[in-house]
Image (cartoon, helix red, strand yellow):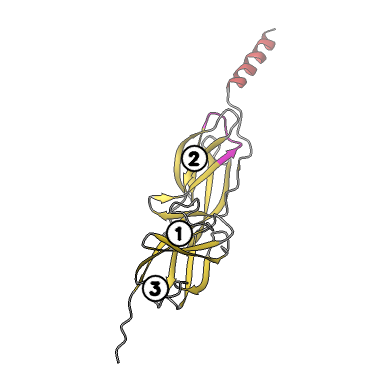
Amino acid sequence: MRVVTAIIAALAACAAVPAAAGAATLQPLKPCYRSVDQSTRESVPVVADGFTPGETVTVSIDGIVVNTDVVADQDGRITGAVTAPYEARGERPFTITVTDAQHPENTATTASRVAALDARLKPRRARPSSRVRFLGRGFVDGTAIYGHYLRAGKLRKTVLLGAPVGPCGRLDAVHRQIPVRRPATGRWTLQIDNQPEYSPLPASVFVRLAITVRRVIRTR
């Protein structure tokens, strides 16, 4: 009888201890996230399973811990988000790792890319009718990239610049700098985004470039 009682007590004690961690898994990320500047970066979701219920986990980006106070729920699951790493220029890969604080060997890692949202013309100064290169990246909100030309606050023309290339939506195309016949002198604004219709606040990300058209004075 004493033996049975001892066994029952031991089972009760085991039931009070949180379930051991399982094999951690981290949900895949999008192919690419955008970085505008150090204070404006895209949010990256962190959803994972297989951790010790009720215990903390650490979240790291590229091996650097960014969060230590995340607690797994009763099912060993965590749901949250971190900010994409800052990238000043170009694009690069990055990794997110989630580690069980009670069982450091129980960890999950997934990878994506981060791109600096950017657009530019090369060369920066050219005749309006000259063909220049349109370069950029971060335009992953659609299957096409458009340029909207504005003068004095009014839309003058919208053109298809090309299709985004690669996971981070690169743009590399050649077009006339301003595809308008005899463009007026003064300041023009070129808004580049993924929207076929112009909007001052498009649903996609956007970059605005200023183009100044000057009057050419010919001398004999």
Query: Which residue sits at x=49%, y=42%?
Result: 81
Q: Compute the Cα span from label 3 to label 2.
A: 45 Å
Q: Which residue is mark 3?
A: 124
- Helix, strand or loop for disc 3: loop
Foreground of the two, 160 or 23:
160
Who's the residue at 52% across and 71% down the image?
173
Residue at the top extreme, as displayed: 1
Relative to 162, is 6 above or below? above
Q: Which marked residue is nearer to the observer: mark 3 or mark 2?
A: 3
Seen at 58% across and 24% down, the residue is: 17
Residue 68's quadrant in the figure?
Answer: top left
The type of residue carrying mark 1 is Ala
Could you classify mark 2 by the number of other residues whose Cα lies within 10 Å: few (under 14), some (14-19), or many (20 or more)? some
Q: Position of residue 206 (x, y in %)?
A: 46, 57
Going by the numbered disc 2, the residue's amino acid type is Thr
State the count of labels. Answer: 3
Q: Main secondary structure of the magenta part?
A: loop
Look at the image and give the residue range highlighted in magenta.
47-55
Alpha-carbon span between mark 2 and mark 1 = 27 Å
Mark 1, residue position: 116
The reply, left or right, for residue 83 in relation to residue 8 is left
Q: Which residue is mark 2?
A: 58
Q: Amino acid at mark 3?
A: Arg
User: Of callouts 2 and 1, which one flags the residue occurring earlier in the amino acid sequence?
Assistant: 2
Percent x, y of residue 2? 67, 8
